Amino acid sequence: MGSGGGGHSAGLMRRGDGGPLPAVRRVLKKGWSNVTAIPTSWFLLLSAILFVIGAGGVLVRRNVLVMLMCVEMMMNAVNLTFIALSRHLNSLTGQVFVFMVMAVAAVEVAIGLAILIEMNRLRATTDVDDAALLKG
């Protein structure tokens, strides 16, 4: 990064005159009130698409590792729904709940990968049909 002039933010793109771009200058002058927000319905649609992809992966694939990743995708889709609705309702409850879901997801990944490694070590496969062979 070069040495910038005056009191402009360091992260803004600069033109030849050393100032920010005109659109950025207008937003900085008027505030963020004129910036259009992405509608909540778009976030909910994206979340539904991610959830369907994850559910399809769990139902179709037989590899345990791929199934775990699809479960994580479904959890992240639900997290996106919580965040979008929390923002729409101006409440922090959904965002706090997302932190709890992320903690559960981290534990789920640790346990799932431990089971997957043990299954691969004993049977040299990650096929979900061979998981029944781990019964004692």
Image (cartoon, helix red, strand yellow):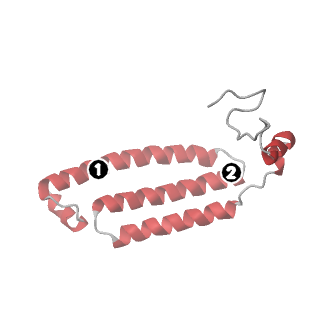
Q: Residues within 10 Å of mark 2 (few under 14, many from 20)?
A: some
- The quadrant in which the C terminus is found is bottom left
Q: Separation of disc 2 and disc 1 at Cα?
A: 33 Å
**Residue at image location 35% in from the left, 49% down from the top:** 109
Earlier-in-chain disc, 2 versus 1 = 2
Whether residue 129 is situated above or below residue 122 in the rendered picture:
below
**Residue toward you, 33 or 97:** 33
Most distant residue in the front direction:
16
**Residue at image location 22% in from the left, 68% down from the top:** 129
Q: Residues within 10 Å of mark 1 (few under 14, many from 20)?
A: some
- Please tell me whether mark 2 sits on a helix, a strand or a loop: helix
**Which mark is drawn over residue 46?**
none
Whether residue 132 is situated above or below residue 10 in the rendered picture:
below
> What number of labels is visible?
2
Q: Which residue in the protein does label 2 denote? A: 87
Whether residue 132 is situated above or below residue 100 in the rendered picture:
below
**Side of 128 where 50 appears, left or right:** right
Q: Which residue in the protein does label 1 denote? A: 113
- The quadrant in which the N terminus is found is top right
Q: Amino acid at mark 1?
A: Leu
